[in-house]
Amino acid sequence: MADPAREEFSDLIQRFIESLSGITDRLPFDLDRQKLRSITTFAALSVAIVFVLKLLRTPPEHQRRQQRPHNSASGPSSGRLRSNTGFPSSEVISSSGNSRVQDAVDEFFRPVNLTLEQHVRHQLNEGRKVTCQLLGIILEETSPEDLQKHATVRSSVREVLLEITKFCDVYLMERILDDESEERVILALNDAGLFTTGGLTSEKVLFCSTENGRSSFVRQLEPDWHIDTNPEIIHQLSRFIKYLLHISPKKSEGAVSSNVYSSSSVEQFFGCPEKS
């Protein structure tokens, strides 16, 4: 007679592999099943063995509870008791197997909580130079006219920007209307502590008098990433810059190049996703 544990073990592995196949069918890109078959099978088998061995281990307390009816039963009723409780029905085994496999699959594919550093590095995709507009992204102000009155660094972006400067050469740039605006911006960045780590300096904050001037700065610096709020500049640079991030409260409409990303803020795109 076959060992029920071995049969269940084999069944769980098979169900686990089938579950993985179902997941690959829902991926938003095509996979070469012929090339990946051996790798997928090996990986699925390895993971299944780890999870199934844990799932099949019966705690000592549970074993003792199962033994009590067998030892304590006596007389004609003992046979009926054993026949009813000794082995679960096939429906129960199947249901238990499905539940265990699903639990194993859910555990294996559970999202990993990344640190801010890990998420920033992942989003940068090995980029080493970043150029970024100031207004509406790093600063609270949204127009050059605002900078003639005040300049304020957005508190929520500070930590993410400092993290980016650890891995990238960062240049900040903006269009201004007068020299006093430049002074306010530099002072605000310094007061926010953005010049203290050495990754960002005042010499890497560039100013111009036109929107085309900002685009020209980017072309000259040839960054891996450029971040901007102006959709026209994003469109113009999409042919020359590897990655672009369009900061906008609304999602971009119409055709967008494959190297252009959209987000409501830098911290939302590069920062850790909110935990549900």
Image (cartoon, rainbow, N blue to C red):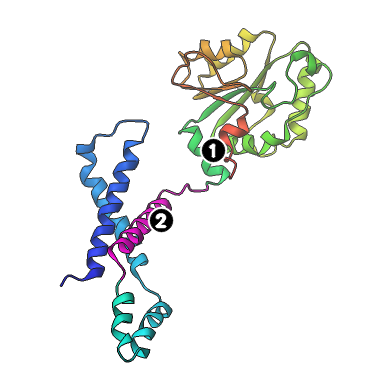
In the picture, measured across the screen, residue 246 lies left or right of residue 110, that is: right
In the picture, measured across the screen, residue 162 lies left or right of residue 75, that is: right
User: Does 105 appear in magenta?
Assistant: yes
> In terms of image quadrants, where is residue 72?
bottom left
Q: Residue furthest left?
A: 1
Q: Which mark is residue 120?
A: 1
Residue 152 position in % (x across, y down): 77, 28
User: Which amino acid lies under the numbered mark 2 shown in the image of this protein?
Assistant: Asp
Q: Main secondary structure of the magenta part?
A: helix
Q: Are the two marked residues, 2 and 1, in contact with CB atoms closer than 8 angstroms?
A: no
In the picture, measured across the screen, residue 154 lies left or right of residue 74, that is: right
> In terms of image quadrants, where is residue 262?
top right
- Residue sitting nearer the eye, 271 or 10: 10
Q: Is disc 2 surrounded by few (<14), some (14 to 19) or many (20+) residues within 10 Å?
A: some
Q: Residue furthest front?
A: 76
Instruction: Tell which tag, 2 or 1, sits nearer the viewer.
Output: 2
Q: Residue at x 56, y 30 (%)?
A: 169
Residue beneath disc 2: 103
Give the extent of the magenta segment: 88-113
User: Which amino acid lies under the numbered mark 1 shown in the image of this protein?
Assistant: Val
Looking at the rendered structure, the secondary structure element under dot 1 is: helix
